[in-house]
Amino acid sequence: MIIIDNIMVSEEIRDIRFCCDLEKCAGACCVEGDAGAPLEEEEISLLEDMIDEIKPYMRNEGIDVIEKNGIFDFDMNGEYVTPLINEKDCAFVIYQVGHELEDRANIVAKCAIEKAWEEGKVDFQKPISCHLYPIRITKNESFEAVNYHKWYICQSACTLGKKLQLPMYKFLKGPLIRKYGEDWYGKLVKEIE
């Protein structure tokens, strides 16, 4: 375990090689699983404030879910998550034509929030849990734990990460800095290297 400023970081973040490979997985993390993406409380109000700017990028099914049930739901532990369409896709998932994909007919799951951000319509990129994936953060009263969430759908990302010799903490540099700041990330790198 690596500890930086009361944040416990799993050694897997240092040891595992990882690089998302959308050509292989097609964004499966946005459409698989038993709950939506974890949301931090402050992200809910951000999404509520900018939903009108995000809706033009969303699918009708996602808009319907949000208008009917709201911007968030709860997982089985009572934590805030994005709502799902038919208990499968995240309400914010959009599908775009991708490159040559295996068994997915050239379709890639992407994020309507991120698309609105890329086009300058909102200043919120996407939920931090999505940006950090496959890292998951567990919060306690006295510390946070940064852990690797191993899931079969990311096997191609592990394969590509090994090929590129790219450690997870380097692949996720931007999201880790977004979450904890440059100073914290610098301490992490110093501790690891």
Image: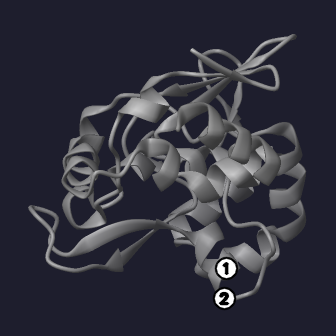
Where residue 130 appears, x then y in whole percent?
57, 49
Is 46 above or below relative to 192? below
Q: Mark 1 belongs to which amino acid?
A: Ala
Q: Say which quadrant the N terminus sits in.
A: top right
Amino acid type at circle 2 is Glu
Residue found at x 53% / y 21%: 10
Are the residues flagged by discs 2 and 1 in contact, CB closer than 8 Å?
yes
Please tell me whether residue 59 is drawn above or below residue 150 in the rendered image: below
Q: Is residue 3 left or right of residue 20?
A: right
What residue is shown with label 1? 116
Q: Quadrant of residue 164?
A: bottom left
Q: What is the secondary structure assignment of the residue under circle 2? A: loop
The residue labelled by disc 2 is 119
- x%, y% of residue 36? 55, 40
Q: Residue furthest left?
A: 103
Q: Is residue 33 left or right of residue 163?
A: right
